[in-house]
Image: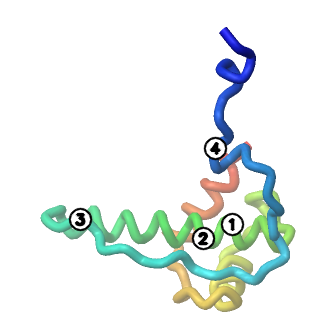
């Protein structure tokens, strides 16, 4: 078997391309959510998305530990990236995401 046949084809994650981390935050294009779920599912889903966006923004801004991310810090970051101010529950979820990412 030729050696070229054994090499895996490059995927999107393994292709050599520049990673631009200094660009400002830009939200991804929104897609409609699947219909027919209970309202609580949509609330939880959107809360998780918001928490992930905020956790990423905090990490990008240099806040790496959950104890550094007080509610005021998280809400200020939400204001900077153009997200509605998060509730206490969402702030708690942001800290949990930062805690379990290690």
Give x and y (percent) for residue 81. 66, 86
- In primary-sequence order, the first of circles 4 and 3 is 4
Kindly state the secondary structure of the residue where label 3 is placed: loop
How far apart, in angstroms, are the residues tagged by discs 4 and 2? Answer: 25 Å
Mark 3 packing: few (<14 Cα in 10 Å), some, or many (20+)?
A: few
Q: Which mark is residue 11?
A: 4
Seen as rendered, the residue at the extreme top is: 1
Image height check: is 29 above or below 4? Answer: below
Tell me, yes or no, whether the two marked residues, 4 and 1, touch with CB atoms within 8 Å. Answer: no
Kindly state the secondary structure of the residue where label 1 is placed: helix
How far apart, in angstroms, are the residues tagged by discs 4 and 3? Answer: 28 Å
How far apart, in angstroms, are the residues tagged by discs 3 and 2? Answer: 21 Å
Q: Quadrant of the N terminus?
A: top right
Return the residue nearer the eye: 90 or 37.
37
Give x and y (percent) for residue 77. 70, 82
- In primary-sequence order, the first of circles 3 and 1 is 3
Image height check: is 42 above or below 101? Answer: below
- Residue topped by disc 1: 56
Residue appearing at x 27%, y 62% in the figure: 41
- Residue topped by disc 2: 53
Camera-near label (4 vs 3) is 4
Tell me, yes or no, whether the two marked residues, 1 and 2, touch with CB atoms within 8 Å. Answer: yes
- Residue topped by disc 3: 34
Kindly state the secondary structure of the residue where label 4 is placed: loop
Camera-near label (4 vs 1) is 4
Residue appearing at x 58%, y 64% in the figure: 52
């Amino acid at each position: 078997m030729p050696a070229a046949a054994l090499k895996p084809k490059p995927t999107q994650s393994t292709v050599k391309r520049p990673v631009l981390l200094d660009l400002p935050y830009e939200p991804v294009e929104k897609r409609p959510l699947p219909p027919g779920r209970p309202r609580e599912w949509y609330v939880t889903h959107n809360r998780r998305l918001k928490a992930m966006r905020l956790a990423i923004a905090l990490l990008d801004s240099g806040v790496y530990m959950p104890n550094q991310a007080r509610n005021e810090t998280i809400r200020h970051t939400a204001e900077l990236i153009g997200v509605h101010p998060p509730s206490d529950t969402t702030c708690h979820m942001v800290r949990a995401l930062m805690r379990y990412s290690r």
